Image (spheres, rainbow, N blue to C red):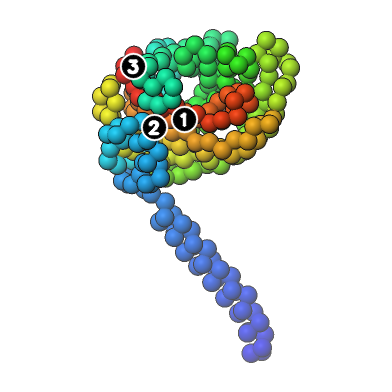
Amino acid sequence: MKSFLRVAWWPAAVGFLACILMTLTAVNAASQQPNNGSVIKLPDKDRTMLTQILGEGVVGKAVPAQTISNPLTFFPLRNGTWTYRMTSGKNKGATVDHVLSELKRDAPGTRWQEALGGNLALFLLKSENGSVETVSTHDQKQGVISRYSPREPFLIADMRPGASKRLTSAVKVYDLSHPDHLTHSGSLDITYSYVGVYEVTVPAGTFKASLFKWQYEGKVGPAKVQDIQYRFYAENVGTVAMIEKTDVSALLVYQQHTKIGKVLIKHP
């Protein structure tokens, strides 16, 4: 009888201890995630790059960060022009317009184009949960279309400060004059992170801006991709400062990375 009790007790005890361990692990993992209202110090490596590309005094102190439940508050999808000054590259000091316009072939407010100067355009989609995603990029200068599947995250709903999402996106590059002609293909591993919220000072003013970061690694055609992108989003304004990634088409043609920084001068 005692032997039976020992045998019966052991699995129950193991199960009970396992439950406690799982609970403690979950609590510990949760405690490591920044909470809403947390002030998240900008990592030194990121601050160094942002300062080098955007300039001294643009990115200031960390301030309390909150989950962005409605991305359209921070990237308003409305027709208008946002004007930026370029802070790096061969055109440093020049201004460039980002023109956001609605494409009306689908449900109202669903599909948008952000034209970056005269050559490059991002085609954006508002998903059912309110997230904004990049469907494709059109490079008029190089004459190519780059399409992403799944779509590249642009501003995702309900991400907590300090959180990251990882995905692998297939990339297909087509000839702009013959959109059914596939010229290159490959894939990108993307790590998309909500870094925190920081004071950002640009010609358009000083804002509390949420910093999102994209890290890319992969291969498209002959081009190896290892790149990084940052965008600061301010409530009811949109992107107030950014470091753009090198477009896939430029990598295919030039085989080099050129970091382009931009700071907001005026917005609609």
Circle 3: residue type? His
Report the side of 19 relative to 11 (left or right). left
Q: Measuring from the top left, give residue 76's x and y in whole percent.
A: 40, 21
Of marks 2 and 1, which one's residue comes earlier in the chain? Answer: 2
Res 14 → quadrant: bottom right
Q: Residues within 10 Å of mark 1 (few under 14, many from 20)?
A: some
Q: Residue furthest front?
A: 90
Please say whether residue 159 is visible from this viewpoint.
no
Q: CA distance from mark 2 to mark 1?
A: 7 Å
- Quadrant location of the N terminus in the rendered image: bottom right
Distance from the alpha carbon under mark 1 to that under mark 3: 23 Å
Disc 2 or disc 3, which is closer to the eye? 2
Q: Could you say whether the residue bearing mark 2 is in a helix, strand or loop?
A: helix
| Residue 37: percent from left, percent from top | 31, 44
Residue shown at 28% from the left, 22% from the top: 203
Q: Which residue is mark 1?
A: 259
First in sequence, mark 1 or 3: give its number: 1
Q: CA distance from mark 2 to mark 3?
A: 21 Å
Which mark sits nearer the N-terminus, 2 or 3?
2
Residue 78 numbered mark, or none? none
Quarter of the figure that contains the C terminus: top left
Query: Where is mark 3, residue-wise?
Result: 267
**Circle 2 residues within 10 Å: few <14, some 14–19, many ≥20:** some
Please name whichever residue, 196 or 36, is drawn nearer the observer in this view of the structure.
196
Instruction: Check disc 2 and report the residue beneath it.
Output: 53
